[in-house]
């Protein structure tokens, strides 16, 4: 065992990957604890990574492996994340929701950017938080970060913030649900259009029963469906900006092609021409979540609490305010 451990430690790539996997596993275990379970493994793992960096410093001897997790595994996780999107459901049942989802994205991103200018908050963080709020939380943030050349620190901080704030709002939805004049379907639709993460939608929609939860997922999938067009739009904007500001060449996010291919496979191949057993599919989705968590740990290790303490406060407060406004907005339009 000591020989194996020594060999891994002497290999920066392997040791870095193993270290991010270890912190991710601790995050998954911590998420089983009362209280911590509400924020989820991703936010727990990011917090662990940030605290490790704060108290023990950045593990420079494992940098190549940590960078591999933060970049390569991130793209693999986004590709596999495509399995969660059932395009067939959107095309057959959710087309009207796409227009509402477009409004949600415009509303969220627009208000976050406006808030950044009004209150002089960090524009990079606010843009990432706006996209995460409008589409699908940390997953959307992770997908667009390479396109807009966001700093690793900004990506990790915004993913952590949106995971925690989204969880608090999901809990709030379950608390006020009995007080609302909405049936299960309407409540599920509202939750799916309003909440940040897919996990938040699951948490808030579950008390509404099977039908309510199904409507919540349908509304949320309509927003996830727009991840690719939004990413391509951002790519086009960045290309225009790069010509005038000499930002260098903009690389096409090829992992989005993989995302689309996995979505098509899960929508039209799996279940029609072949069937993946539920235990295998559930394990694959868990593995995808674990890979995304590993990549977020890699990014989280680049976060210095001393550097972002002042930068993150305003974006967090504005995110809470915009999320409240979004809840009222979606209640009005659905």
Image (spheres, rainbow, N blue to C red):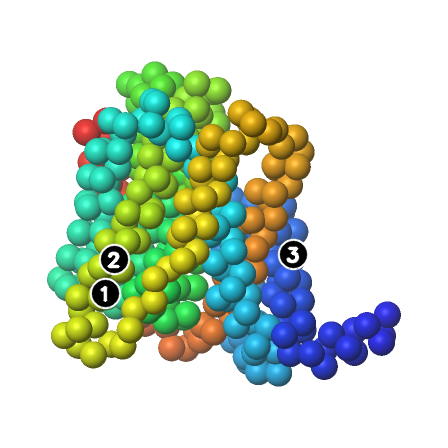
The answer for how far apart the CA atoms under marks 3 and 2 are is: 33 Å
Q: Which residue is mark 2?
A: 234
Q: Which quadrant of the structure image shows residue 234?
A: bottom left
Q: Are marks 1 and 3 in contact (CB under 8 Å)?
A: no
Residue 280 lies, with reference to residue 29, above or below; the image says above
User: Measuring 22% from the left and 59% from the top, which residue is drawn there?
Assistant: 236
Q: Which residue is mark 1?
A: 238
Q: Are marks 1 and 2 in contact (CB under 8 Å)?
A: yes
Residues 24 and 48: in front is 24
Q: For mark 2, does the 10 Å Cα neighbourhood hold few (<14), some (14 to 19), or many (20 or more) residues?
A: some
Q: Which residue is mark 3?
A: 25
Quote the CA–CA distance across marks 1 and 3.
36 Å
Q: Which mark is residue 191?
A: none
Q: Position of residue 304 (x, y in %)?
A: 44, 75
Q: In the structure shown, which secondary structural element does the residue marked by tag 2 occupy? A: helix
Crowd tier of the residue under label 3, counting other residues whose Cα lies within 10 Å: few below 14, some 14–19, many 20 or above: some
């Amino acid at each position: 065992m000591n020989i194996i451990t020594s060999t891994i430690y002497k290999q920066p790539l392997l040791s870095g990957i193993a270290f991010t996997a270890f912190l991710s596993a601790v995050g998954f275990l911590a998420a089983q604890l009362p209280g911590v379970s509400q924020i989820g493994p991703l936010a727990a793992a990011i917090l662990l990574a940030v605290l490790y960096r704060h108290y023990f410093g950045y593990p420079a001897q494992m940098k190549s492996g940590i960078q591999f997790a933060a970049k390569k595994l991130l793209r693999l996780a986004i590709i596999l994340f495509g399995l969660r999107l059932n395009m067939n459901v959107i095309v057959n049942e959710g087309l009207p929701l796409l227009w509402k989802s477009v409004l949600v994205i415009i509303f969220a991103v627009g208000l976050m950017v406006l808030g950044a200018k009004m209150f002089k908050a960090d524009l990079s963080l606010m843009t990432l938080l706006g996209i995460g709020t409008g589409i699908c939380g940390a997953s959307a943030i992770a997908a667009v970060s390479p396109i807009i050349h966001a700093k690793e620190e900004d990506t990790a901080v915004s993913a952590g913030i949106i995971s925690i704030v989204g969880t608090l709002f999901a809990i709030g939805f379950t608390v006020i649900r009995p007080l609302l004049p909405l049936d299960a379907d309407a409540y599920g639709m509202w939750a799916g259009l309003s909440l940040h993460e897919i996990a938040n939608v699951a948490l808030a929609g579950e008390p509404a029963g099977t039908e309510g939860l199904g409507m919540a997922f349908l509304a949320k999938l309509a927003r996830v469906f727009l991840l690719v067009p939004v990413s391509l739009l951002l790519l086009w904007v960045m290309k225009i900006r790069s010509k005038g500001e000499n930002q260098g060449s903009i690389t096409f996010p090829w992992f989005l092609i993989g995302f689309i291919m996995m979505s098509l496979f899960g929508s039209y191949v799996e279940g029609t021409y072949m069937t993946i057993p539920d235990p295998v599919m559930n394990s694959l989705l868990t593995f995808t979540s674990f890979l995304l968590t590993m990549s977020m740990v890699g990014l989280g290790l680049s976060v210095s609490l001393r550097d972002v303490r002042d930068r993150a406060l305003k974006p967090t407060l504005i995110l809470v305010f915009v999320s409240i406004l979004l809840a009222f907005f979606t209640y009005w339009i659905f």
